[in-house]
Image (spheres, rainbow, N blue to C red):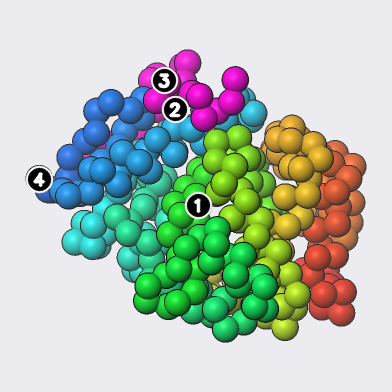
Amino acid sequence: MSVSAMAGTPVPGLAHALKLSPVTPDTGIAALPWFSFEVLASAGCRPAAGRIARRVERAYWLLRQALDVAPPVRLLVLDRADWRQFAARDDFGVVHLNDAGDLVVGSEPAQAWSDLSAWLRDAVDGASLQVLLRLYGRDPDSGGPALGSLAEALVAHELAHRFAAYAGARFPRRWLDEAFANYAMVAVLGEADPVGLRRLGALAQAVETLDVELPSLVRFERAFGMLELVPSVVAQLALTRGVYQTYAVAGIAPLARMLRLFRAGIATDKLPDHEIARLLGFHAHPTLAAIPSLFPAARLRAAA
């Protein structure tokens, strides 16, 4: 049975697994009681919260079954006023995990998505742009592709970080951590939202030739979280292309093997990137070993 058929179905064992410290929100925030995990939404955000919670529930079901881990999860869908109280990011609408481990989503996509849309409008070739416009629709402000649907798909990426942390996985490089989360997002889209997976794949393909914007792995490691928008997104899409290929040939199973590898705590911190990738290819799937080569060879060296 596909995950899409499980929408709204409680995950066995989920109720006792999801116990977090209580949240005492302002009176403007209300719970959505019909989900199998805690969902809190700002006043006026209930329709969006219901839609996003269904997406989170499908992602949780898939990742729990694949990874055999059941972390506590709470979803907060917030308007701008409540964002200041509960979010760990200043920029409104950026999907993230806050310090309490809550999955925080804005009631509307972050401004950065419109900025990215404007860049895509000018940077990608005409044929690729037409494909993106057909798949995403047109952003009325930027004239580029409307990326709001991709913004919501990132809940699976952040949820994967929650699973990995709860399982005790220790990734020796940020690119591995992000590749794991991107793999989870690709797998969730593949099972629950094939159109969404096609959109993500088209975007990753559209920027593949824009190497001038692709940072080195060293820079990605050292400046993660501080990179400018375009280099950060182009790097994430390079990682996505790598895991997309693995999912296409092997499904979700390598994701679980990847988690087990780094859950075991093998000492890889001092190894160069290509050696870490070789281990990943041997223990998880051979195609994953090629991920560092997706970054320009002249810029590839061991992360310090």
Q: Quadrant of the N terminus?
A: top right
Magenta-drawn stretch, dominant element (helix, strand or loop): loop
Q: Earlier in the sequence, mark 4 or mark 1?
A: 4
Q: Earlier in the sequence, mark 3 or mark 1?
A: 3
- Residue 27 is marked as 4
**In this rendering, the label closer to the viewer, 4 or 3:** 3
Residue that badge 3 annotates? 10
Q: Position of residue 144 (x, y in %)?
A: 49, 74
- Residue 154 is marked as 1
Magenta residue span: 1-26
Task: Give amino acid for label 4.
Answer: Thr
**In this rendering, the label closer to the viewer, 2 or 3:** 2
- The alpha-carbon separation of the residues under discs 2 and 1 comes to 18 Å
- The alpha-carbon separation of the residues under discs 4 and 1 comes to 28 Å
Q: Earlier in the sequence, mark 2 or mark 1?
A: 2
Residue that badge 2 annotates? 7
